[in-house]
Amino acid sequence: MPLPKQKHTKSHRNRRRSHHALKVLKLASCPKCGQAVLPHQVCRNCGSYQNREVIDILAKLTKKEQKKKAKELETQEHEQEHKEEK
Ligand SMILES: [Zn+2]
């Protein structure tokens, strides 16, 4: 049996869309490299979680990229140590 077409009033539409707003992401900072990370998740920049290395982020890169990334991480860690001293 064919259903009658539903009527969509402005009120109905607006009430439906009242739940469509986006929420602001809640970010923490990585204790090792200081990058913004999602809470309860591995840091995508240095691959550490709870102060230990969980994933090897250099494994997927080429040799040239590996060298660059390793240097980058080293400087970030040094910066983080200087922050903690202050
Ligand atoms: Zn990190």
Image (tube, grey):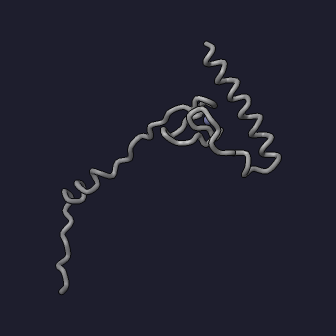
Q: Quadrant of the N terminus?
A: bottom left
Q: Is residue 64 above or below residue 52?
A: below
Q: Position of residue 7 (x, y in %)?
A: 18, 69
- Image region (quadrant) for ligand 1: top right
Q: Quadrant of residue 10?
A: bottom left
Q: Position of residue 2 (x, y in %)?
A: 19, 84
Q: Quadrant of residue 6?
A: bottom left
Left or right of 40 on screen, residue 77? right
Give the total number of marks visible in the rendering.
0
Left or right of 6 on screen, residue 37? right
Q: 21 or 77, which lies in front?
A: 77
Q: Position of residue 8 (x, y in %)?
A: 21, 65
Q: Is residue 58 above or below residue 85?
A: below
Left or right of 35 on screen, residue 68? right
Q: Residue at x 57, y 37 (%)?
A: 49
Q: Quadrant of the C terminus?
A: top right
Q: Residue furthest top?
A: 86
Q: Residue furthest bottom?
A: 1
Q: Quadrant of residue 55?
A: top right
Q: Residue at x 76, y 37 (%)?
A: 70
Q: Is residue 50 above or below residue 79?
A: below
Q: Residue at x 75, y 50 (%)?
A: 61
